[in-house]
Amino acid sequence: MQRFTPLLVDAARPCRHLPGDRWFVDETYVKVAGRWTYLYRAVDQHGQVIDVLASARRDQAAARRFFTAALSHGRRPVEVTTDKAAVYPRILDELVPEACHVDAARENNRIESDHSRLKARLRPMRGLKRLRSVQTISAGHAFVQNIRRGHYELGIDTDSHARLTAAFTELTLAI
């Protein structure tokens, strides 16, 4: 997992669809070596996971790192929906001043329900020991989830149940 996930994600990058213009951003908690850490995630209006970032702290520097990495994936958002965390308005005004920031109650349900899929995957594991492991596993989970949802031009000629197998077959030829 640690070795091949970054290789597969990099090989598939040219086949990835551009993210939508409405982003839903939130952070969730994950236990690493017995301590709670933060996992920043962003999805667009189509359900494509844009980016993930594991961080030991929930502060302005972590939010800036996350948004800088997420904005490098292509299209800039027109609207960003977040929770009411105090750091988001300042970071969004700095990095994406043209975007409308929405932080109303229950507007961020799309990303909140998307966290449950990742947490369901992490729960049966025996625990993660390093922050790097959380970053790699969550990035790999987002990658597989995006392939299943059809956000890559990989395995699109096959049935949706066999899409993941066909996509990995195409990627092995590319690597």
Image (cartoon, rainbow, N blue to C red):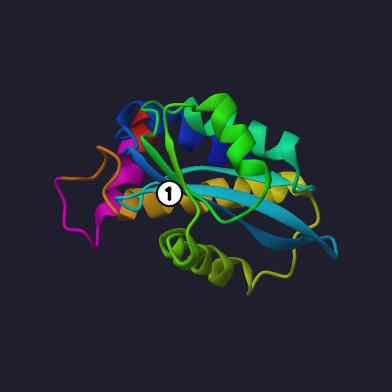
Can residue 2 be seen here? The reply is: no
Q: Is residue 88 left or right of residue 99?
A: right
Range shown magenta: 157-170
Decide if residue 108 is on the left or right side of residue 167: right
Residue 107 in view, yes or no? yes
Q: Residue at horizontal 67%, vertical 43%?
A: 87
Instruction: Give the image location of residue 90, x and y in percent.
Output: 63, 35
Q: Is residue 74 magenta?
A: no
Q: Is residue 158 magenta?
A: yes
Three-letter amino acid code at the position of disc 1? Val
Residue that extends furthest to the bottom in the rendered view of this protein: 124
Question: In this view of the protein, which residue sits in the foreground, 140 or 51?
Answer: 51
How many marks overall?
1
Residue at position x 21%, y 59% in the image: 160
Q: Position of residue 169 (x, y in %)?
A: 32, 43
The residue at which mark 1 appears reads as 43
69 versus 4 height, above or below: above
On the image, the x and y values in percent for residue 64 come to 65, 32
Q: Residues within 10 Å of mark 1 (few under 14, many from 20)?
A: many
Q: Quadrant of the C terminus?
A: top left
Q: Residue 116 placed where, x, y %?
A: 51, 69
Q: Residue at x 61, y 48 (%)?
A: 40
Horizontal side, residue 145 vs residue 155: left or right: right
